[in-house]
Image (cartoon, rainbow, N blue to C red):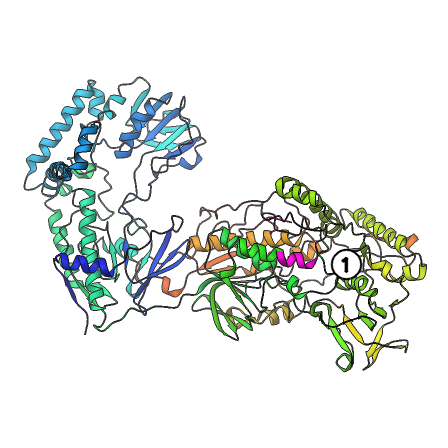
Amino acid sequence: MDAVVRAGRRGPRVRRALRRQVPAAPAPAPEHRVERAVFDEDADLWRVATTGGEITARFVVSAVGPLDQPKNPDIPGIDDFAGTVLHTARWDHGHDVAGERVAVIGTGASGLQVIPELAGKAAHLDVYQRTPIWVFPKVDFAIPTPVRALFRIAPPVQRLVRLVTAAASEVIMVLGIVHYSKVPFLVRAVEALCRAHLRRQVPDRALRRALTPRYGFGCKRPSFSNRYFPTFMRDDVDLVTTPIDRVTPKGIVTADGREREIDTLVLATGFKILELGAMPPFPVVGLDGVELGAYWDEHRYQTYEGLSVPQAPNFWLMNGPYTVTGASWFSIIEAGATHAVRCIAEARRRRATRMTVKRGPHDAFTRDMRRRMRGTILAQPSCARSNSYYFDRHGDAPTSGRSPGCTCGGAPAPSTWTTTPMDHEVAIVGAGFSGLGIAIELKRHGLDDFVIVDQRADIGGVWLANTYPGIAVDIPSASYSFSYEPNPDWSRVFAPGAELKRYADHCADKYGLRPHLRLGTRVERARWDEAARLWRLATPSGEITARFLITANGVLHQPKRPDIPGLDDFAGKVMHTAEWDASHDLSGRRVGLIGTGASALQVIPRIAAEVGRLHVYQRTAIWVAPKPDFRVPRPVRRLFRAVPATQRAVRAVTNAVVELFLVTGITQNRRYPFVVRVIERVCRAHLRRQVPDPELRRALTPTYGFGCKRPSMSSTYYPAFLRGNVELVTAGIERITPKGVRTADGREQEFDTLILGTGFKVIEPDNLPPYPITGRDGVDLGEHWARERYHAYEGTSVPQAPNLWMLMGPYSFTGYSWFGMIEYQSTHVLRCLTEARRRGATRVQVRQEADDRFFRDMLRRAKERPSTTTTARRPTATTSTPQATRPSCAPPRPSRRSGGPAGSAWTTTRSPAERPSKGRPWPSSVSPASPSPPPEPRTSRPRRRSSRSPSSRSRTTPRRGSSATARPNWPSASP
């Protein structure tokens, strides 16, 4: 059976029960703005979308007052005004009007208060009046201290005063306005009092005539003042009653063609009251997808007791249609609160999960209110001249109400409270520095509903997994850290790996990330659920759902084993540098090391003195620059800690060096070819100084241009090959035997241990993406890239995967510091997330034409890099120019993908449950006048056109044309 409640009058028992059963809800954070409320009919609860995330509640009480949304006048040219524009409801206290020419548009209650204040400061004040206002004399004076003391010690005295003032308000507002037809003489008496007040203060007849209302008292909101009328007697104040034609950049032009120049324009034009978007103050989607505002706009405003509507169960409006009675505002609040509280208390007593006002009582109440309206002052013909916000577009004035008492219908009697599982708003996969960096940015922007998933048992990413001897960062430590979290305790210029792991722990602890960690959880697959507008992550321990997915696995997390026959048949110990076995003793052993990349470059010098014999198998030589690595003295570290600006200065220098080497020299090679030539000369000179043997030096000299392959820095790598127990092998490996390695020349060398310094899988199908990702229409991202080549808009997003961002995706690397790229991409992602939350969007998706355009641009820019560089065999006769004929870096192939027209990048859509089936539908597009996303904090780096990372347009104006916003890209800073 249905739980039906007749909410009549209840005594102290109900109030005591309510106090026991309904705990006070905590005040919401001020930055959490409600964007919409949707009733979930399956769960019998409301889902309230806010800028701080979704809130679910069984009951919703909308207590947003009617004076919440300022109303700007519909006057042509107001946006073109070159001076300062202020609205009384959004006053800028930092703006000083002293000595300025000021114009005030509007003479309502706000204008009545602000005009006397401005008149004493401005050089000249123009007041533009469309409709005069009824003004009472204001009995206002300071309450003597003894009287206040009396109120404190004898509260009944203050209650008596309250009773008298409430009675005066009731006589004037309720009897005179609501019951006008019964006591019309009361309104005439009030009007006579207001005219007498005007005559006393304004002796000029012409001015007095302009300030006299030509409509009945109560048609428009009246007010009290003793200073308003005298203001117009000042020589520096003009009352303008001629209608405004337009606003120009310099001032205001009236209908008579006269223009008055001003410096500041003040809008005292009131608030949106009975307008779509103002009542209700946010989109409310009730039963059957009915959007309440659109329904009212079409069918006229109507509520039961000014509080409830049949289309919205469990929902009350404290300031709804037909709820204002003219009495004290607090009396109206208390009456509405009593009504809502009775309904909620009875629902809890009956364990009902749904409370809906019946259609019959609702329609009867609406008919009664419209009947009553015929006897109010608002039904008189004179009100047509009042320009009052009391009236809606249908001509109704839903301002009358009566004492509450409702009939509410609910769910079956033996109902229980139900809870619906809440999804994480953001899922971050990866707990290395990329994952920690984006998580910190989420925290700093107040987005706390996220989870960090990582398959390892601890945080740190590559610095947790890699523990081989000699591991260290090959970027100066001052640059290898978050710009907002410098570490003054680096022990060396190039910090060892263990310190990087400690730095990761420090960041996680300082920014409170550990409660968000879900370690030891491997993501096996990610699938986009189109119906629910969220991602479903499959893990061995269960499914994780999130609205947005950020892959932050990095690129150096899957070791790459060489494709050499017989590797699995080797009888000795096989170790990859990324899977180092510290328990394995290399002392005196015969060791073979395959690879001479960045990891091997650090391992070789450390183990050369320990092993019995070391053979290094080199396929491609690496460019090696001298490494100015030394211990940072304690006094310097103390200086960094005491004066952080000194460390920032050092960081600026190291950033400049990295930029010179990697960004300018590589991505801007065609513009600055001499930079690469200088770097190559430095590296060759370093090799000559450390390796005197010409043959060995020739074998260690790269035969490709600097930047085609990842370079590195070391001052101990080359000297290791001068040791008697170290041999460099450049012959190709034919196969690996159970005992050792056989090269193409037929020579076989036996080993006890084989070390694989062969790097990581980076641009390979099973690493990018790091796990199967199935986007919309069942598209597997890895398979899609295999067919269409790697590409991602701004290096982070693809059209096939909504709500997905990849940190360090295709075309995201610029050569700059790893932490710099993390911060720029995080800023890009945060802008997208913030705008999606602000708009209540459930899907953010890059458009295909924008993705195609970006990909073509990347292919074009790739030609500026060192793709045609040659190096002679003899180091002394080396040339390295873009005009060389033999390519040493493979250039990219032309695009096979068709490109679309220039357009915007982001699309936000709403789920079907959020689209109303009746009334005004959700907009599918927003005009170019839509507001741009809120600005993000900028970094100090200037914008460059050297490369395009996911953050490469941070200083540019985002392109227009999105269906979500007129400024769709929301990019971050450019490295």
Determine the residue positioned at 39% across, 68% down.
421
Provide the secondary structure element on which disc 1 rests.
loop
Q: Is residue 81 left or right of residue 357?
A: right
Membership of 322 in magenta stretch: no
Quadrant where the N terminus lies? Answer: bottom left
The residue nearer to you, when weighing 609 against 204, is 609
Task: Report the magenta stretch's main SS.
Answer: loop
The answer to whether residue 896 is seen in the rendering is: yes
**Residue 491 percent coordinates (x, y):** 70, 51
The magenta region covers 483-502
Q: Amino acid at mark 1?
A: Cys
- Determine whether, in the image, residue 849 is placed left or right of residue 382: right
Q: Quadrant of residue 55?
A: bottom left
Question: Horizontal and vertical percent for residue 543?
Answer: 48, 72
Any part of residue 796 in sight: no
Query: Image height check: is 95 above or below 410?
Result: above
